[in-house]
Amino acid sequence: MQDVSWNDLRYVLAVARTGTLSSAAARLRVDPTTVSRRIGRAALILGSRLFYRSGGMLVPTEAGQLVLAHAERIEFEVDRLKNTVADADTAISGSVRVTSVPILVNRVLIPALPELHNKYPMLQLELIADATNLSLNRRDADIAVRLARPHKEQSVVARRIGQLDYVVFGPSGRKARGLPWITYEQGMAALPQAAWIAKKAIKHERADRSNLAVNDAEAVLQAIAAGLGKSLLPCAIGEQVKGLSRLGGRSPVLSREIWLLVHPELRHLGRIRAVTDWLERVVRGLGARRTKA
C-alpha cells in the first residue's frame, strides 16, 4: 500500500482552509487541476472521501476532519524544522506574512517599508490588507496588527504597542456645518467610529445625517478627499493627506488601541523579531506625529 505524503496533506489543508479548489490553488501557487488530483490521491490512499460539497464550498467529511487534525500536527513539526534550520543562519531572510486593516497597510506600513528593506534586503514581507481578523492559529498570517485587544485567539502572544487618536476630517476649504457624515455599513455598526458618528448625528437631530456608508476606513478617506462629506480618521493619517482638513477642536474624539499579535512558536525567530521590532518603531512614529499635531 502506498503511503500518503506531507506533499499530499498540504493540499488537503489548503482546501479545508479556503473552501474551494481555486482558492487553494491560488494559495499554493498551482492550478486547480493539480489541487484536485492531489486531493483525489490522498483520498484514494486513505480509502475514504475527504470532502463533500455544500453551498458551493468544499467541507471536510468526518474522515477528513481526522486527517486534518493529523495534517496540522505534521505541518507544525515541518514548520518548526524549517524555522530551526533557517534561524541557524544569522542573516535575516525568509518570508513573513503580516496582516492588518487596509488603511494601516496602505497609509502607514507601506510608506515605512524602505527602512525594513534597506536593513534586511533578504527578507520578504507579505502584507495582507484585510478588514477581517485572519487567523494566526491557522497560519493565515505570522503577525497581525489590530485595532482592538484580541479575544478569540487565546493562544497567540499579544501586546499593546500604541494607539490611534481620531478626529473629524472634511474636505479642505469646506465648513463642517451641512456636510453629511460618511460612516460604515450596517454590518460594521459596532466599530467605535461608526458608533460615535451615530451618536453625533442623533445629538444634532440628524441635521447632518449620513448619505454614504462604506466598509473600510480607506474608503472613508477617499470619500472625504472627493468632497462627499466628513468623517472620523486617525489624526496621524488624515494630517498627511492633501485635500483633507481637521474640523472642530484639536482634541481627539476617540482613541483605539493598536495591538501586535504573533504566533507563539514563531516569536523567537530572527526574521519575526526583525519585523515586530520594525512594526513597533513605525507605531511609535505615529505617536510622534500625534504629539507634533
Image: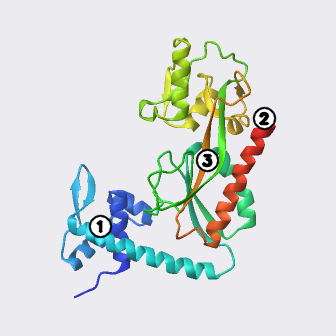
Query: According to the image, label 1 marks what residue?
Result: 36
Check disc 2: other Cα within 10 Å, few if <14, some if 14-19, many if 20+: few
Q: Nearer the viewer, residue 257 or 85?
A: 257
Query: Looking at the rendering, in which quadrant would you find the C terminus?
Result: top right
Residue drawn at (39%, 77%) of the image: 74
Point out the residue furthest to the bottom here: 1
Number of residues whose C-alpha sits closer than 10 Å to that of mark 3, classed few (under 14), some (14–19) or many (20 or more): some
Task: Work out which quarter of the rendered image holds the N terminus and state it.
Answer: bottom left
Mark 1 or mark 2, which is nearer to you?
Answer: 2
Q: What secondary structure is found at the residue carrying circle 2?
A: loop
Q: Position of residue 121 (x, y in %)?
A: 70, 68
Q: Which residue is mark 3?
A: 258
| Identity of the residue drawn at 58% across and 65% down | 96
What label does residue 293 carry, if any?
Answer: 2
Q: Nearer the viewer, mark 3 or mark 2?
A: 3
Residue 173 location in percent, x, y? 73, 19
